[in-house]
Amino acid sequence: MFNVVIVRYGEIGTKSRQTRRWFENILMNNIREALVSEGIDFKKIEAKHGRVLVKTNKAREAVEVLTRVFGIVSLSPAMEVDADMEKINKTALKLFRKKKRELGLERPRFRVTARRITKEFPLKSPEIQAKVGEFILENEESEVDLHDYDIEVGVELMEGRAYVYVDKIRAWGGLPIGTQGKVVALLSGGIDSPVAAFLMMKRGVEVIPVHIYMGEKTLEKVRKIWNQLKRYGYGGKGELIVIKPKERERILEKLRELKKEKYTCVFCKYMMVRNADRIAREFGAKGIVMGDSLGQVASQTLENMYIVSQATDLPIYRPLIGMDKEEIVKIAKEIGTFELSTLPEDEIPFIPKHPVIRGSWEEFRKLYKAVFGEEPKKREC
Amino acid sequence: MFNVVIVRYGEIGTKSRQTRRWFENILMNNIREALVSEGIDFKKIEAKHGRVLVKTNKAREAVEVLTRVFGIVSLSPAMEVDADMEKINKTALKLFRKKKRELGLERPRFRVTARRITKEFPLKSPEIQAKVGEFILENEESEVDLHDYDIEVGVELMEGRAYVYVDKIRAWGGLPIGTQGKVVALLSGGIDSPVAAFLMMKRGVEVIPVHIYMGEKTLEKVRKIWNQLKRYGYGGKGELIVIKPKERERILEKLRELKKEKYTCVFCKYMMVRNADRIAREFGAKGIVMGDSLGQVASQTLENMYIVSQATDLPIYRPLIGMDKEEIVKIAKEIGTFELSTLPEDEIPFIPKHPVIRGSWEEFRKLYKAVFGEEPKKREC
């Protein structure tokens, strides 16, 4: 029945002509990658007058996949026909009937919204709306209600063709992946870090996922989480990079010896960022993403984040910093990582009973020197 | 009619006993500050069994103010009476009638939700619910519907007292300001920076607002924005710090001379962060908040943010980094800064036509050296 998907995008439209063309091309590539990798046949993908049209007989399936392509604001499976009033009327009626059946309504309220994207068609939008509305009223039990409607029939006209639809499905918005460069995301296996990575991907960033090894159970879980996140990664999805930290034993031993076990977590995070920094340089990534949310646990303080930030001169992006746990969990559930994040993981034997709440950089420096024999240094300095 | 406000808080409850007491005290102080500064009389503020009770005859007014105190999840104006079944019934009926009138419903569906916070009261919660429900049904046209209800009558019992209410008003959640230290927020006058500051405040941070002077019109506007944000700042609200940059002319001249005007914006932001860094050290703030959202304008790139981040060794917090403009605008409207951010501002004559999109750190370093005669350095290095 449907033969095309109308893809609408948002912010790209506000850029310069040149930037816009570039964005559209990346978006079309990502759409292509998504459809090909999910095995959905299509005939053509083209950018036209501020929307992308995907010609396909698998419009329903395509829409399901494309809701996961960033940069897309909304999608409509549509029927493309000649821009001829009779054909438009018949198509609108057909789709209206289908939707009416789906909703199981006796006498649905509806409205028609028409838009001439290019202006060749002789009738103006209000006239088209009136004609289509009349035709539906004549042929189906229904009533018009412009504000409180059950069904909205959409008609878009351009270049001698009409696109008729009854569904407008919201997608995630954001920007197409590949438009904003790369960052390294640290994935721990918890609820927060996948959400942080997701939000950066949503803003068009290609994420390089890095996991610092804790044990097989946790690794297995992080693999599952990344596989889920990849479903949003059309346009750029790396393979999970797993790092087995070499210095861990040395650090733990020294901290025990100095009776500073309370610095274990901060030290551990500092070393994670050091590793992420190294990977970022190898891959040309321009930042590091972390799932920090201020005060979520007692040790997620500004002081501890200061220490951890000293491990790199790359910006650390913390998209969750201003969010409550409830908001983070809500997104995790929507993107399908929540369940995975609650799978069992390896117990970490060296977590101290009372981690330092407001770590001191001076003290950390001393500990670092005691462990490594030198001052902590950033690359750039 | 009401004589108490029940204040419910969220995340605090999950902390250790000691931390929790500390949080509760800060929350109670912030509540006190809010009520006093808005001129709302109250008799007592006390923490009891995981909620805060504010004894006041101005419960409605108090609730309006307290929705702006962070750390609070929901609020109910309530009637406190002796925990006696007859009194509870009468109070419930009175509030039910009031609410029914407000809603203008003939036959509202309702449910009763009772909770014994302490267990002295002889009846269990389901029995209390049944009794109150029956009493309302006998005396008012209504019906019980546990799932799809117009009115929920709440009864909470503790220490021989009953608290009856029919409204539960959502507040912002987050953490009480003062629990998480201080950060400097750069306020430009645009839509984004106030939202970024707001989100940090919401997570319990005291914000020190800094504005880099551009002209009187913009300053006026930023003052209005900060005055609006202060309405959420109970517990810690600084005065706006305005900095008149000294080096601006020198930088602009040199960039013109070198034909590198395209670096003006990056340079300007770098210098803003340098100033913020200085203020942060003076005030003991542990970070800097900025309103960056990736790719929102062409020059908000990872590359340019990298350069700007080199101006400080403090973490830069960017709570909007993963958000679309639409989401940011939505919050700006909710918190009342959107309208203010669209007020007229001073024109900036030196904004280049084509700002650099992906600035190079190496090139920036050279420019910096050309202007200041030395390499850009961080404090810590």
Image (tube, coloured by chain):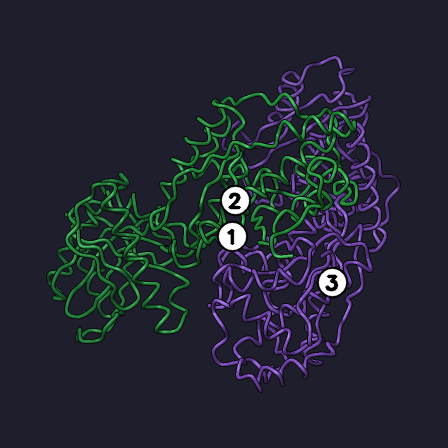
Chain colours: A green, B purple
* Chain at tag 2: A
Look at mark 2 in the image and give the residue it sits on.
A196
What's under tag 1, amino acid-wise?
Answer: Gly
Which residue lies at the image location 71% right of the left edge and 50% below the top edge? B68
Which residue lies at the image location 67% right of the left edge and 36% below the top edge? A267
Report whether residue B225 is seen: yes
Outermost top residue: B122
Which quadrant of the figure has residue B237? bottom right
Q: Position of residue B239 (x, y in %)?
A: 80, 64
What's under tag 2, amino acid-wise?
Answer: Ala
Report whether residue B71 is seen: no
Mark 3 residue crowding within 10 angstroms, few (<14) / some (14–19) / many (20+): many
Which quadrant of the figure has residue A135? bottom left
Which residue lies at the image location 37% right of the left edge and 50% below the top edge? A171
Judge left or right: residue A62 versus residue B286: left
Q: Position of residue A355 (x, y in %)?
A: 73, 31
Look at mark 3 in the image and give the residue it sits on.
B209
**Reading the chain from its start, which is encountered first: label 3 or label 1?**
3
Residue contact between numbered discs 2 and 1, judged by CB atoms under 8 Å: yes
Q: Secondary structure at mark 2?
A: helix
Say which mark, if any, is on residue B322. 1
Q: Position of residue B376 (x, y in %)?
A: 66, 67
Mark 2 residue crowding within 10 angstroms, few (<14) / some (14–19) / many (20+): many
**Is B154 rendered above or below residue A136?**
above
What's under tag 3, amino acid-wise?
Answer: Pro
Which residue lies at the image location 62% right of the left edge and 38% below the top edge? A269
Q: How many marks?
A: 3
Q: Position of residue A91 (x, y in %)?
A: 15, 55
